[in-house]
């Protein structure tokens, strides 16, 4: 006689079900520890209104931004209540005062003035000036 289900085999049902790992569940509670919540109350002053800035294509704006995270070729900036990733090219110049600095030298909370172009949903910075502390 074949066992139709695990109950016939004498296996207790609770043991046969594997517990769900918390990262597999949906919802806010499983966000990674280092996920960034966009700058709360970080004012971004733009030459265009924020909602246009995040939607329009081929847009070049000068704006003041605040750094949330900085890596080698990308910077995460706060735009209003959202955050955007800005890609850096090889020709991107980052200056603080009169010194040229590396993207890795940027810290969270640094204020930037940047020229940003947006093409196909990808924002690229051409020139970045960091405010002196």
Image (spheres, rainbow, N blue to C red):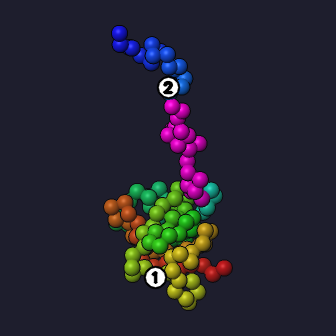
Q: Quadrant of residue 44?
A: bottom right
**Residue at the limit of the structure toward the bottom, as seen here:** 98
Of the two numbered discs 1 and 2 on the same chain, state the one appearing first in sequence: 2
Residue 65: x %, y % from top left:
55, 68
**Residue at the limit of the structure toward the top, as seen here:** 1
Q: Residue at x 58, y 56 (%)?
A: 34
Vertical placement of residue 105 versus 54, above or below: below
Q: Quick one: quadrant of the C terminus?
A: bottom right
Q: Residue at x 52, y 86 (%)?
A: 100
Q: Quadrant of residue 97?
A: bottom right
**Residue wearing tag 2:** 16
**Residue at the limit of the structure toward the right, as seen here:** 133
Task: Measure how far apart labels 1 and 2 are at the Cα level.
Answer: 59 Å
Look at the image and tell me whether residue 130 can be seen.
yes
Residue 53: x %, y % from top left:
44, 61
Vertical placement of residue 104 versus 3, above or below: below
Point out the stretch of residues depicted in magenta: 18-39
């Amino acid at each position: 006689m074949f066992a139709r289900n695990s109950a016939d085999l004498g296996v207790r049902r609770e043991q046969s079900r594997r517990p769900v790992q918390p990262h597999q569940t949906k919802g806010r509670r499983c966000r990674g520890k280092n996920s960034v919540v966009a700058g709360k109350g970080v004012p971004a002053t733009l030459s265009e209104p924020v909602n246009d800035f995040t939607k329009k294509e081929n847009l070049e704006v000068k704006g003041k931004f605040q750094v949330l995270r900085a890596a080698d070729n990308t910077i995460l900036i706060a735009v209003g209540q959202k955050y955007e990733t800005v890609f850096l090219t090889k020709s991107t110049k980052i200056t603080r005062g009169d010194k040229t600095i590396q993207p890795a030298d940027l810290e969270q909370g640094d204020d930037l003035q940047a020229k940003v172009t947006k093409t196909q949903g990808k924002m690229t910075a051409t020139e970045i000036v960091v405010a002196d502390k």
